Amino acid sequence: MRTPILSPNRKVRPAAIQPKTHSHGDNLRGAMLMCVAMVFFTLNDTVMKFVTQDLPLYQSITIRGGVVMLGLIFLTLREGGLRLRLPRRAVLPMALRLVGEVGSTILFLNALKHMAIGDLSAIMQSLPLAVMLAAALFFGESLGWRRILAVLVGLAGVLMILRPGTSAFTVWSALGLGSVALVVLRDLATRMFSREISSSTIAFYAAVSVTLSAALLSIEEGWQRPTVEQAALLVLAGAFLTVGYMTVVATMRVGEISFVAPFRYVSLVVAILLGLVVFGEWPDLWTWIGAGLIVSAGIYSIWREGQLREG
């Protein structure tokens, strides 16, 4: 029987689950790795937004994807190589994950090309709350009333940023929301994998699928010869993304999630700063208020989850 979403027994933890003890040093290393991952992901976004102002979007994704695949192959060869053959039970989760990966990447980069990077980053900060709610709906994970309230507060923050019904809400805003929904699909599908499927295998399948999809879409969009500067920037974006992929995986293996996870919001600060320095963008008051609500709700939910695991 499915566990209800709202459960008064949320503090009960199965006896088989024994939390791993982490030292203060582990937590600090995990926090540092999370900050590094978020900075590199945001640097990748900034470079892609800059390059795609002049270079076709899908061409840019294809070139960057080639760099990411080469980077992942190099890194995984050092660890013993890729194991690309999937067990039969992993085929459906991988297919669902790739739909989420490809769709979210394409929607996000289309939105990023036309939106302020700080505004889009603020919307994407609602992802942990969206994943938490979706996990409750589809996997029967219990949510107490406090975290249900946090989700509603986060949703209010998103609505403040988007302001549906006003001139602030555009088709690109809708694409940003669609990207969040598809990342939720990607992350839920990832939960369906067994431990025998390595993180490097998942990352490589993701890179291949995004690159091939962009290459197909680029046929209609067309290609143009990139300048030396544009080519160098796309190589740099691929390197940033590769480091981000590998570092964010490492964060889940070092330190307590409840301690490390809040540091993912570093990406919002970095996005706002880079938006100002590179593009001259500065969020308006509604975006600041909405982002504050989203981040506060997300940090509270992570803290609450940590309390329940200890309880």
Image: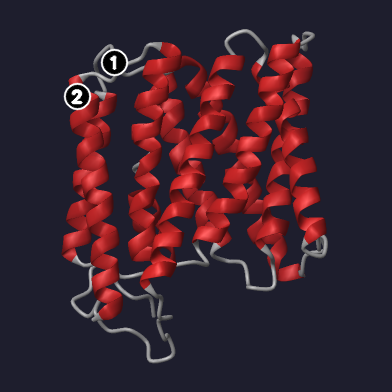
Q: Position of residue 78 (x, y in %)?
A: 80, 59
Q: Earlier in the sequence, mark 2 or mark 1?
A: 1
Q: Picture quarter containing residue 148? A: bottom left
* Residue at the far bottom in the pictured view: 15
60 with respect to 35 (left or right): right
Color scheme of the displayed model: secondary structure
The local secondary structure at tag 2 comes to: helix
- Tag 1: Cα neighbours inside 10 Å, few (<14), some, or many (≥20)? few
Near-viewer residue (116 or 234): 234
Q: Residue at x 21, y 67 (%)?
A: 144
Q: Which mark is residue 286?
A: 2
The amino acid marked with disc number 2 is Trp
Structural distance between the alpha carbons of marks 2 and 1: 10 Å
The local secondary structure at tag 1 comes to: loop
282 with respect to 112 (left or right): left
**Image quarter (top left, top right, bottom left or bottom right) of the N terminus:** bottom left
Q: Position of residue 41 (x, y in %)?
A: 52, 38
Is there any visible trace of residue 22 in the rendered image?
Answer: yes
Reply above or below: 9 against 287.
below
Q: Position of residue 179 (x, y in %)?
A: 48, 36
Reply above or below: 136 against 112.
below
Q: Residue at x 38, y 75 (%)?
A: 2
**Image quarter (top left, top right, bottom left or bottom right) of the C terminus:** bottom left
Is there any visible trace of residue 116 in the rendered image?
Answer: no
Q: Picture quarter containing residue 155? A: top left
Contact (CB < 8 A) between labels 2 and 1?
Answer: yes
260 with respect to 233 (left or right): left
Question: Which residue has dot 1 on it?
Answer: 168
